[in-house]
Image (cartoon, rainbow, N blue to C red):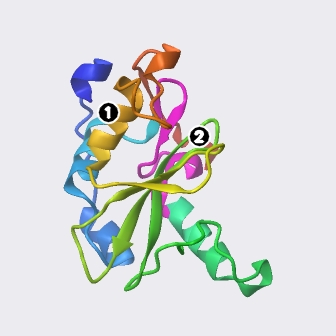
Amino acid sequence: MIELTGWEPLGISVDWAAIEGELGVPLPADYKELYEVFGGGVFSDSVYFLGRDEGVSFDFLTQWRVSLSVDQDSKFGDVSAVDPYAVYAPGGKGLVEWGSTEWADEYCWLIDAERPGDYPVLARAHDVGGWHRYDMSTSEFLYRVLADADFQPFGIAQYDLGTTFTPGSGDDE
């Protein structure tokens, strides 16, 4: 990803133990490496990568907390926004979003507290329907989205958007 974008690693220091303590599971090692290099922000002006402390828009813990509270609030009915899954709750099984696109594609991990370390990527395209499962790392999935024109329905390389990265801003808190 560094080579693809020409990005200069930031070397961000993160208290992963606190974050993983709240979630009740460790996060994927490659996600943590990606975040420490890039922080949260936007790839190719269209793919949002959630991180930590870049303001509400790019803070995956804030996004997860909101999604979980909405998912568990009975006044919204008993159908999850990530149906047929649920938003991950500590100790359970469900989805945690780590990325999205400007056209409403969603990128999540399927986390099962009983299987820590096994985090397939589930992705849903806004116009294609159901969830697609990818048994690959976060960084491989993201790389394929950005660089593999044949990675359908999620690849964006054919749109010639360039492979840039723009850091998120902490100004929206």
Disc on res. 171? 2
Residue type of the residue flagged with mark 2: Asp
Q: In this figure, which residue is indicated by the disc labeled 1?
A: 143
From this view, report whether residue 35 is shown above or below residue 42: below
Q: Which residues are magenta?
A: 42-61
In reply to whether residue 33 is colored magenta, the answer given is no
Residue placed at 26% from the left, 50% from the top? 136
Vertical comparison of 73 with 47: above or below: below
Residue 31 is situated, as x and y percent measured from the top left of the image, at: 28, 50
Question: Would you say 73 lies left or right of 7 here?
Answer: right
Amino acid carrying mark 1 in the image: Tyr
> Which of the two labelled residues, at mark 1 and mark 2, occupies the earlier sequence position?
1
> Is residue 7 visible from the viewing direction of this image?
no
Q: Is residue 80 visible?
A: yes
Label 1: element kind = helix
Q: From what the image shows, is residue 35 above or below residue 149?
A: below
Horizontal and vertical percent for residue 35? 31, 45
Q: Quadrant of residue 24?
A: bottom left
Q: Quadrant of the N terminus?
A: top left
